[in-house]
Amino acid sequence: MLEVTGLRVAYGGIQAVRGITFHVNTGEMVALIGANGAGKTSTLKAMARLLNAAGGSVRYCGKEISALAPHELVGEGIALVPEGRGVFPRMSIVENLLMGAYSRQDKAEISADSDHVFSLFPRLKERSTQLAGTLSGGEQQMLAIGRALMSRPKLLLLDEPSMGLAPVLVDQILDAVVALRSRGVTVLLVEQNVLAALSIADRAYVIETGRIVLWGSAAELRDDARVREAYLGV
């Protein structure tokens, strides 16, 4: 479904992403893991066209998407859940969800999809009229994922969904992501919580200083001595 080849991202003279290549198959959950500052978020932002890449190719379902505008990617079936959640704080939960469906006209189906989000995240249903800015960090993360789902994506890009959350909330978020994958959504997960990412992903790539240095199945990487020492503390 997704093929990234030789992707480069630069901030002035600083090379943040140095020609990385990876792919995501339809129906997979693939994790891009590494320490803070490794280049993970820059990679995702370039793919989502929030940053201009300095080089390389991004192909989605066989189509080059490197020149598309961000809103055009939504029409192609790609949705991004950004780092930091990015909810609309002065809008209610329901209004935030409707913003995720801005490109759609099928009102009955939009309502059904809202119900699906509420079944996935019951805490949001309990607070549906509450302003997003008054929610906890975990609730805002649930809302950001729910808003992305309202566009009915085929490919979901998740940027650091566990950041700043208590362990019990991390488990709830990751359980929801697993449920989405079981319903046919392909997921690219960017995480610095390596143990959490490897617990749910099919495959993973390890990125360090803008380069992919290891890759393989999640089970292989969990057992890799270099990953265990550098990221798992064992």
Image (spheres, grey):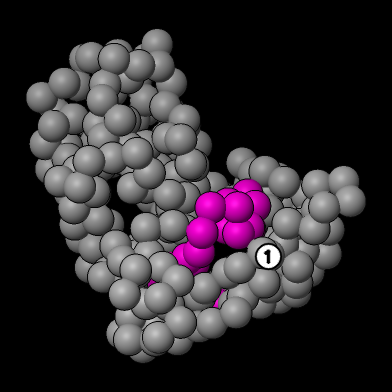
Q: How far across and down, in percent of the image, does residue 44 sit?
A: 59, 55
Q: Nearer the viewer, residue 202 or 115?
A: 202
* 51 to 102, vertically: above or below: below
Is residue 22 something that shows in the picture?
yes
Residue 31 belongs to the span the image colors magenta: yes
Residue plotted at (72% across, 62% down): 17
Q: Is residue 213 left or right of residue 112?
A: right
Residue plotted at (43% across, 21% down): 88
Which amino acid, mark 1?
Gly
Residue plotted at (40% across, 76% down): 229
Q: How far across and down, in percent of the image, does residue 123 sit?
A: 13, 32
Report the span colored magenta: 23-45
Residue plotted at (87% across, 46% down): 12
Where does label 1 land, which residue? 210
Is residue 66 something that shows in the picture?
no
- Mark 1 lies on a secondary structure that is loop
Q: Nearer the viewer, residue 206 or 138?
A: 206
Q: How far across and down, in percent of the image, does residue 157 sit?
A: 47, 55
* 167 to 220, vertically: above or below: above
